[in-house]
Image (cartoon, rainbow, N blue to C red):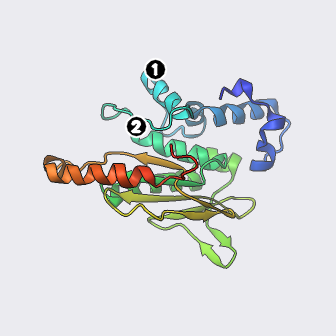
Amino acid sequence: VRWLDLDWKHSGLASTLGVDTGESWLQEMLLKSMASTEYFCRTFLTDTYYKKMTHQQKAALASIDDNTIPKLALCCFRGFGKSSYGEATAIKGVCFRQMPHAMFVGSNEELATASTENIKTELMTNPNIVELFGKFKPGKLTEMTYGFSKKSYFLVAPVTGKAISFIHPKGAKQRVRSTRMKVDGRTWRPYFISIDDLEDDEEVLNSETRAKLSRWFHNGLLHCVDTNRPN
């Protein structure tokens, strides 16, 4: 979706985000940020994206934004920034209330947790995000209090106090069935899955281990999404 195709009045952002502004420059910035992860990164994640992006990096982010691509694989050199792209996608999705359930997968849960912790830190401490979208923090929901943990956590909207997203890490070959979670009155299966460095350097040398990982990936992980939107 090109931001030029979006209209502030009909975008729903004013009510969704609680940002009722008549400033055209701010409206334009929000519409651009919602439509483009690249623009969002350069505007709000300036501590990470302070260098000029290459055309390959821009193309990778544009591919992530393309909803006509159901499954996307990025094969990039070390230092390209692919790990942070999944985090940026989730952060942007949370800010615009478009990320109800995100799963981050690595060769082990500890590595996956590093990404989910980075997301939490940005949403709680990034001054660019906090100033405009508010500070995402733990809050009470019905009879339970959902707070941040070192593993899975809910994200609560700053203004309404309602859960708007659930983010959790998974290690390779961990149980991924029954990963449904109720968020804002609706039960969600993983809406977005980011997989990074799935294979361990040592285990990948074992053919039996590779076969087990392949079965888990194709028969388990790829089938844990909602059947109404299998891709």
- Please give the name of the residue rendered at 60% of the width and 46% of the height, measured from the top-left corner: 93
Q: Label 2 neighbourhood size at 10 Å, few (<14), some (14-19), many (20+)?
A: some
Q: Position of residue 144 (x, y in %)?
A: 63, 77
In-front residue for pair 47/154: 154
| x and y, in percent, of residue 2 in the image | 66, 26
Q: Is residue 52 visible?
A: no
Going from the N terminus, do you reach mark 2 or mark 1 first?
1
- State which quarter of the image contains the N terminus: top right
Q: Residue at x 53, y 66 (%)?
A: 148
Q: Please state if 1 lies on the left or on the right of 56 as rendered.
A: right
Question: The residue tagged with tag 1: helix, strand or loop?
Answer: helix
Left or right, 179 with respect to 98, comes to left
Q: Say above or below: 209 vs 185.
A: above
Which label number is shown at residue 82? 2
Label 2 residue SS: helix
Q: Amino acid at mark 1?
A: His
Q: Is residue 147 left or right of residue 203?
A: right
Residue tagged 1: 55
